[in-house]
């Protein structure tokens, strides 16, 4: 490796090289030095926040050493690199994860002997916890100080976060590229039952998990015009794009530690800054104030994350974000490649770029522009490199989520890129035409440019397919669906092999070890794996199966669940101003039924709450027709329905669903007659750190999307990994979960995706016939039972089922949903041993859903990339 330091000086560098802490005592020394030097505080004014900062700085110091070494190693080995481009990284908190991942691998003999070092197996967390305790702080309180890095909306963003964890754990030379939003997803407050959004200024305190690389600044241009003066009139020749507005992209790096490896990868997030360039026209017109204001506007590009999940709005600022990020990332990737002095033809052998949905598709166009306009490669030679480099992951088949940009807006912001897209499309359509001369409509159907009125639009998904060598869906059913629906024509054109499936996964480090330490402990004790190797090889969990019917083990298993339920009850109490909603004395016999995810009509939280209302009405009916409360409890045993999730700020129906849940809760929770047998809780501001408390506490969780709409779902995997059972539709990854854990261990219901079109058709052409049960529920809602001051408050919701075609098929699935819920009650309350057996077997067989497996599949089948292992 090149170095700027002369040989004779290196001895001194070596002598003073930085060292990691390895014991609790060394950690404490670091901690105190950070309190004094970094924070300029002392023993006398070190509060929990300062303790969090000092702990993070200390842990970070260890990470940075490995981080630097990893980058040097990856450069020296010169193997193929992977870049994961995602507009969202929903990372959550970093400290606990970093501590867990610090655990280095151990030889068996270390375990138990020297307990308090980082190499003693299963104790990195214990060691730091004790050390912090000795310093006078409570570990959990210290962790609580960290704000979530909430730079994502939901599944797509959290998937990216799990992926970077697994890429580091698998020693892949892989970087993430994203944006450093100053405001993450909004914080949700519930006021009078309504969602209110407040800004999430998460960088309020210094962020110890990022390093500003102020030396890495990439100028990014927008607007302007294309200058053909030099290139003449020939198309495809290199041209100059004279940008009209220029901003700088500044790199911020976050270390991504792997588990039990010294590999620490990089997540590079770009932040927009004004240039210091001098604007002559502004100066000449003497308009100083205006020119300052214009400069400040640069920063707005990375100010805020767009809060839509599965929905595209087509705003200019969003397109600016996308180009800013793609251009900066590509520039960085190309710069690194050029240092290797390899010929351009080797670019795809050295680099794989994964597009997380269509948001980064401009990177395809930008690379073509760089190669043709700046590097002067021949068009076709360039395009060959581009298509071999990129691969595209689709995360949805829903039309409203597919990105399209009107060419007017696009061409104004990126005039040269629009030309390039036209040329890409021209060559693509020409090839299609040659191959399929008989199919006259085909060209129009697959054109990257949609001939829409009032204006033509760029179909980003089609551009992503044409610009990539592989396209994948995120669960088997979804990957099949994209081939038969939205991308059908492209399967005909490219053949089926371009399309593949990689079923999503989740990282067991965060979603088992970190979120559920008690269960992790029970597992490692039971399968005799105190060094936690099962977190790297989840097939080891199958050893749990032989304890599935063991009474003592079941009882320990149940104790862990009860502990986690109490922990959640505490959180709910805290969020409810210190007032308990859930009866603690009965928690062992209370079924925790949880649905937490973005609020969306297709995810059908409305069906869930309709089901709750139906249950409540049935209980009341029994009482009023003379049944005793014991008889009611026999049929409808104790249950808490827990909801959480954000609605997009502009999504009227989703916001109405939130209000309905809260209004129903107000009525049911106050009704003394039903003696606390049923409660409804809406947990405000669902986020990653709350998920870590909520998910381990579930007995049952709901994944009840209309068949064919949820591409995969990933929380379904998290719940199963924590011993919760699932009630779900035959949709997304529920299908493979069923296959892995066995159909006896999951509660499936509802119509299948192949029937959805026909059912929708029936609703459109014949008025919707409601089942008696649902009809009763809707009538009660319409009577104003939950909104006495405004009986028509929920009309839009009831009407959408009754009169507007019931697009999400609530009426078709309602009865089988309710019946399945009653089956759930019976097993949970009448046969706890059977329930526990299902729970244990689920965890035993959840291994497939580790994101480590998923990343290996990407590496083998899409990226053709190999791990770069640290020397041992
Ligand atoms: C989500 C899907 O809705 C979800 O089913 C999937 O698990 C997740 O991606 C990860 O693959 N999609 C999105 O969040 N957003 C878009 C635009 O699809």
Image: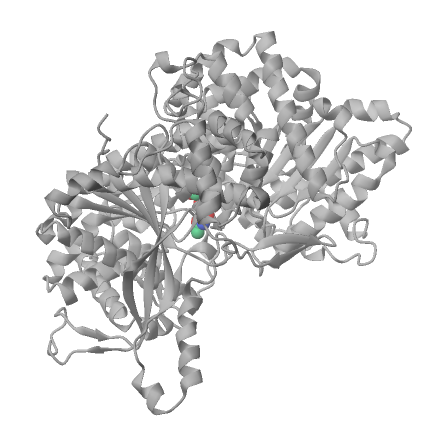
Q: Nearer the viewer, residue 801 or 504?
A: 504
**Is 422 left, or right, of 675 in this rendering?**
left
Image position, residue 761 (x, y; %): 54, 49
**Is 303 left, or right, of 376 in this rendering?**
right
Q: Nearer the viewer, residue 764 or 450?
A: 450
Q: Nearer the viewer, residue 40 or 76?
A: 40
Image position, residue 520 (x, y; %): 50, 22
Label total for image: 0
**Is 763 left, or right, of 469 in this rendering?**
right
Q: Residue at x 12, y 49 (%)?
A: 340
Tell me if residue 94 can be seen: no
Q: Kindly indicate the quadrant of the structure image that contains residue 216.
A: bottom left
**Split into 4 quadrants, where in the image is the C terminus?**
top left
Q: Nearer the viewer, residue 732 or 56?
A: 56
Q: Taking 374 as reference, is 506 above or below it? A: above
Image position, residue 184 (x, y; %): 50, 54
Q: Residue at x 41, y 56 (%)?
A: 180
Q: Residue at x 37, y 56 (%)?
A: 359
**Split into 4 quadrants, where in the image is the N terminus?**
top left
Q: Taking 563 as reference, is 710 above or below it? A: below
Q: Taking 149 as reference, is 634 above or below it? A: above
Q: Residue at x 34, y 72 (%)?
A: 413
Residue at the extreme bottom = 285
Q: Kindly indicate the quadrant of the structure image that contains residue 44.
A: top right
**Is 86 left, or right, of 544 in this rendering?**
left
**Scheme of colours in the image:** one colour
């Amino acid at each position: 490796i090149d170095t700027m330091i002369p040989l004779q000086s290196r001895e001194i560098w070596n002598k003073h090289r930085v060292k990691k802490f390895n014991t609790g005592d060394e950690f404490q020394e670091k901690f105190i030095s950070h309190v004094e030097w970094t924070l300029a505080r002392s023993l006398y004014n070190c509060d929990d926040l300062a303790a969090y900062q000092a702990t993070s700085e200390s842990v970070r110091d260890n990470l940075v050493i490995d981080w630097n070494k990893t980058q040097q190693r990856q450069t020296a080995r010169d193997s193929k690199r992977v870049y994961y481009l995602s507009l969202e990284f929903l990372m959550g908190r970093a400290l606990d994860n970093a501590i867990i991942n610090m655990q280095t691998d151990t030889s068996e003999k270390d375990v138990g002997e020297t307990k308090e070092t980082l190499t003693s197996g299963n104790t990195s967390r214990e060691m730091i916890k004790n050390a912090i305790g000795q310093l006078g702080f409570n570990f959990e309180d210290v962790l609580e100080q960290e704000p979530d890095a909430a730079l994502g909306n939901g599944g797509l963003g959290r998937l990216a976060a799990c992926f970077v964890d697994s890429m580091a754990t698998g020693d892949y030379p892989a970087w993430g590229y994203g944006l450093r939003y100053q405001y993450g997803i909004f914080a949700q407050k519930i006021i009078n039952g309504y969602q209110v959004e407040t800004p999430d200024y998460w960088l309020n305190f210094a962020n110890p998990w990022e390093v500003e690389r102020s030396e890495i600044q990439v100028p990014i241009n927008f607007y302007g015009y294309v200058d053909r003066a030099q290139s003449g009139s020939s198309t495809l020749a290199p041209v100059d794009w004279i940008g009209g507005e220029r901003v700088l992209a500044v790199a911020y790096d976050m270390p991504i530690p792997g588990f039990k490896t010294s590999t620490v990868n990089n997540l590079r997030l770009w932040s927009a800054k004004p240039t210091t360039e001098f604007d002559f026209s502004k100066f000449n017109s003497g308009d100083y104030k205006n020119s300052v204001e214009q400069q400040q506007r640069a920063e707005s590009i990375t100010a805020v994350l767009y809060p839509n999940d599965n929905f595209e709005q087509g705003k200019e600022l969003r397109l600016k974000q996308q180009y800013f990020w793609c251009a900066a990332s590509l520039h960085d990737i190309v710069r690194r490649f050029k240092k290797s002095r390899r010929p351009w033809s080797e670019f795809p052998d050295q680099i794989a770029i994964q597009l997380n949905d269509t948001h980064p598709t401009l990177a395809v166009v930008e690379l073509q522009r760089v190669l043709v306009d700046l590097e002067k490669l021949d068009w076709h030679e360039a395009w060959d490199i581009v298509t071999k480099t990129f691969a595209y992951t689709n995360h949805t088949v829903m039309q409203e989520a597919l990105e399209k940009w009107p060419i007017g807006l696009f061409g104004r912001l990126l005039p040269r890129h629009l030309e390039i897209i036209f040329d890409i499309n021209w060559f693509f359509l020409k090839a299609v035409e040659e191959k399929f001369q008989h199919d006259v409509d085909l060209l129009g159907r697959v054109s990257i440019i949609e001939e829409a009125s009032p204006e033509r639009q760029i179909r980003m998904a089609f551009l992503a397919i044409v610009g990539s060598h592989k396209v994948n869906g995120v669960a088997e059913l979804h990957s099949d669906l994209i081939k038969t629906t939205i991308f059908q024509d492209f399967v005909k054109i490219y053949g089926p092999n371009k399309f593949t499936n990689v079923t999503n996964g989740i990282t067991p480090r965060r979603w088992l070890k970190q979120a559920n330490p008690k269960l992790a402990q029970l597992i490692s004790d039971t399968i005799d794996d105190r060094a936690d190797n099962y977190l790297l090889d989840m097939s080891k969990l199958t050893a749990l199966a032989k304890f599935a019917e063991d009474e003592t083990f079941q009882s320990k298993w149940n104790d862990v669940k009860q502990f986690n339920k109490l922990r959640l009850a505490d959180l709910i109490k805290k969020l409810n101003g210190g007032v308990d909603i859930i009866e603690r004395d009965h928690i062992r016999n209370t079924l925790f039924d949880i649905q937490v995810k973005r609020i969306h009509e297709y995810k059908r939280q409305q069906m869930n709450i309709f089901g709750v209302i139906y249950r409540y009405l049935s209980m009341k009916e029994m009482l009023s027709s003379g049944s005793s409360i014991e008889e009611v409890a026999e049929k409808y045993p104790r249950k808490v329905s827990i909801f959480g999730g954000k609605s997009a700020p502009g999504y009227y129906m989703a916001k109405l669903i939130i209000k309905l849940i809260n209004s129903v809760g107000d009525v049911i929770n106050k009704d003394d007659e039903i003696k606390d047998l049923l409660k409804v809780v809406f947990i405000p501001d669902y986020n990653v750190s709350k998920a870590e408390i909520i998910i381990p506490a579930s007995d049952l969780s709901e994944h009840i999307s209309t068949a064919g709409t949820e591409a995969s779902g990933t929380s379904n995997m998290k719940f199963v990994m924590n011993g919760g059972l699932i009630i779900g539709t035959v949709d997304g990854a529920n299908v493979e979960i069923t296959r892995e854990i066995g159909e006896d261990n999951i509660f499936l219901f509802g119509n299948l995706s192949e029937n959805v079109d026909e059912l929708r058709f029936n609703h459109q052409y014949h008025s919707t016939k409601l089942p008696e049960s649902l009809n009763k529920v809707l009538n009660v809602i319409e009577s104003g039972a939950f909104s006495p001051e405004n009986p028509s408050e929920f009309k839009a919701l009831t009407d959408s089922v009754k009169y507007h075609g019931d697009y999400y098929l609530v009426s078709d699935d309602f009865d089988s949903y309710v019946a399945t819920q009653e089956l759930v009650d019976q097993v949970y309350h009448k046969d706890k041993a059977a329930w526990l057996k299902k729970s244990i077997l689920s965890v035993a067989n959840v291994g497939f859903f580790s994101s480590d497996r998923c990343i290996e599949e990407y590496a083998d089948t899409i990226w053709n990339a190999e791990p770069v292992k640290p020397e041992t």
